[in-house]
Amino acid sequence: MEFLKQNVWIIGLALGSGIGLLLPLIKRSANGSAAISATEAVVLMSRQQPLIIDVREPAEFAQGHLQGARNLPLAELTARLTEIQKFKQKPVLVYCQRGKRSAAACKQLQQAQFTSLYQLEDGLDAWLKANLPVLKPSLKGA
């Protein structure tokens, strides 16, 4: 008991470190995808070149999207799975505007046996808040 009293800060540090190491596992949501921040998504994109799926509607996609993103609206995702079958064993990054639709999309993709799913936490809103670039349509004739 005396040991615990004298070394409480070391024990606290060890516990805090353990929790920090386990945090990525804790962040893994029930739908089988890892929720990652915009910064973590940039690292994923540069290291693993995932398939990037934007599940927003085409009009939203046209307003701006991540470079290399493929627009597969949530309502069409199940019907269009054949387009992305070859990515079942590869990393897939899914996003929407705020994160709700991408969570539903990840659930559908998990049910279709996609094995490496990542969901952009807080969606495109978080990406923009981090001042990361999006592709926007160019103004023709300007």
Image (cartoon, helix red, strand yellow):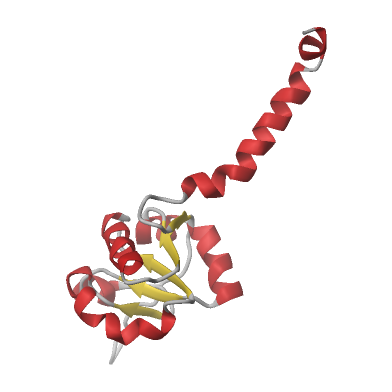
Q: Is residue 21 left or right of residue 126?
A: right
Residue drawn where x is 49% and y is 76% of the image: 90
Residue drawn where x is 72% and y is 31% of the image: 14
Furthest toward the bottom, the residue is 141
Is residue 68 or residue 117 the one in the foreground? 117
Residue drawn where x is 20% and y is 74% of the image: 59
- Image coordinates for residue 141, horizontal then vertical, percent: 28, 92
Is residue 141 or residue 42 the one in the foreground? 42
Can residue 138 be seen here? no
Vertical placement of residue 17 versus 81, above or below:
above
**Which quarter of the rendering shows the C terminus?**
bottom left
Furthest toward the left, the residue is 75
Furthest toward the top, the residue is 2
Residue drawn where x is 40% and y is 71% of the image: 114
Question: Which image quarter: residue 103?
Answer: bottom left
- Image coordinates for residue 65, horizontal then vertical, percent: 36, 73
**Which quarter of the rendering shows the N terminus?**
top right
Vertical placement of residue 70 versus 41, above or below:
below
- Image coordinates for residue 69, horizontal then vertical, percent: 38, 78
